[in-house]
C-alpha cells in the first residue's frame, strides 16, 4: 500500500508512478488528515510512504497521523521523499518512525523535484520545472525497481550538514518560520474557497468572502500555489515569484 501526502503535487506524481508499476493502491493522506481520519487500515505487508520534505524531515502532520493510525498487517516500510534540494538526515528520523510502528525500515530515497516553497525560495518557471521533473525520472525508475524487487534503498548521504539541518535546525525552523500570519490576499481574491479546500489542516476560513488563516499552518504552500487568481501573498517574500503546482505543468513522461 502507498500512503501519499502532497502539498502541490510533486509527491502525488511520484506516488502515481510507483502505483502504476506495482499495481498498488494510493491512500490520500491529505484527505485523511483534513478529515481527522485515524481509523485503522489493512495495509498488507509492505507500506510505501511518499511525502515532500519539510525542514529536512517528513512533514510533522504526517508523522503525527502515522503515530495515531493503526496499520494492520504492515511489516516493512519504504520512505520516498521529494525535495527542492536535499532531505538532510531525514533517514534517521524515518528509522525511528519505523521502529515505533514495529516495522522493518527498508530505507529512505530522495527525489529532486521542482521547488514550491515560495515563502522562502523561488519556484521555477514551467519550462524549467518540466526539465527538473524529466531529470527526476531515472531516479524514480530506480526507486520503482527497488520496490518491485522488495529491495532496501541504498543509504542516502549523511554528513555533518545533513545531521545539523534535520536535527537542531528542524525544531527551530518550525518554531520561527512555519507560521501563517504573513499570508494575505489582495483585491484579486474572488472568495472562491479554493484555498479552504486545499488546506490539509483546516487552517483557513472564509470570512466575508475572504480567507483568514489560523495558527495550524504546515507551510505546504497549497493555498498560495493553487489560488486561481494568484491573489495570495506571503508577506513580501512571495511577491513577483512564480506559483507552482505540478498539475499546471501538463507534464507527460
Image (cartoon, helix red, strand yellow):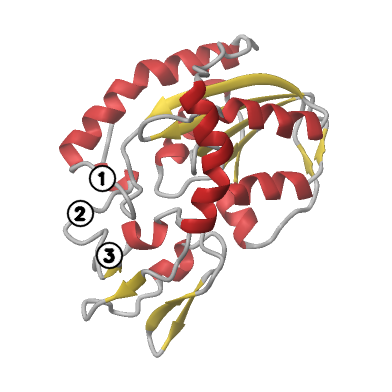
Above or below for 44 versus 31: above
Q: Position of residue 238 (x, y in %)?
A: 26, 59
Closer to the chain start, of discs 3 and 1, is: 1
250 relative to 45 in the view: left or right: left
- Disc sitting over residue 123 in the figure: 1
Above or below for 228 versus 155: below
Q: Secondary structure at mark 1?
A: loop
- Disc sitting over residue 169 in the figure: none
- Disc sitting over residue 241 in the figure: 2
144 relative to 221 in the view: left or right: right
The 10 Å Cα crowd at callout 3, few under 14, some 14 to 19, many 20 or more, is some
Tell whether label 1 touches label 3 (CB within 8 Å).
no
Q: Position of residue 177 (x, y in %)?
A: 45, 56
- Disc sitting over residue 228 in the figure: 3
Q: Residue at x 61, y 29 (%)?
A: 24
Q: Residue at x 24, y 65 (%)?
A: 236
Residues at marks 2 and 1, CA–CA distance in whole angstroms: 7 Å
Amino acid at each position: 500500500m502507498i500512503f501519499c501526502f502532497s502539498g502541490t503535487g510533486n509527491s502525488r506524481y511520484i506516488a502515481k508512478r510507483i502505483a502504476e508499476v506495482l499495481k498498488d493502491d494510493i491512500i490520500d493522506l491529505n484527505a485523511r488528515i483534513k478529515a481527522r481520519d485515524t481509523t485503522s487500515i489493512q495495509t498488507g505487508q509492505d507500506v510505501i510512504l511518499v511525502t515532500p520534505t519539510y525542514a529536512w524531515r517528513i512533514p510533522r502532520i504526517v508523522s503525527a497521523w502515522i503515530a495515531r493510525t493503526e496499520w494492520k498487517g504492515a511489516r516493512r516500510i519504504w520512505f520516498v521523499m521529494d525535495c527542492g534540494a536535499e532531505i538532510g538526515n531525514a533517514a534517521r528520523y524515518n528509522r525511528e518512525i519505523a521502529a515505533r510502528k514495529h516495522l522493518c525500515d527498508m530505507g529512505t530515497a530522495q527525489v529532486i523535484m521542482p521547488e514550491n516553497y515560495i515563502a522562502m525560495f523561488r519556484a521555477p518557471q514551467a519550462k524549467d520545472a518540466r526539465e527538473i521533473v524529466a531529470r527526476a525520472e531515472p531516479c524514480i525508475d530506480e526507486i520503482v525497481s527497488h520496490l518491485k524487487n522488495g529491495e532496501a534503498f541504498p543509504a542516502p548521504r549523511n554528513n555533518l550538514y545533513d545531521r545539523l539541518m534535520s536535527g537542531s535546525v528542524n525544531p527551530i525552523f518550525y518554531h520561527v518560520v512555519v507560521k501563517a500570519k504573513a499570508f494575505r490576499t489582495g483585491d484579486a481574491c474572488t472568495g472562491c474557497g479554493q484555498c479552504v479546500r486545499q488546506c490539509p489542516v483546516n487552517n483557513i476560513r472564509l470570512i466575508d468572502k475572504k480567507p483568514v488563516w489560523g495558527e495550524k499552518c504546515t507551510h505546504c504552500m497549497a493555498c498560495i500555489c493553487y489560488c486561481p487568481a494568484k491573489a495570495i501573498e506571503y508577506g513580501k517574500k512571495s511577491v513577483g515569484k512564480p506559483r507552482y503546482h505540478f498539475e499546471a505543468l501538463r507534464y507527460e513522461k
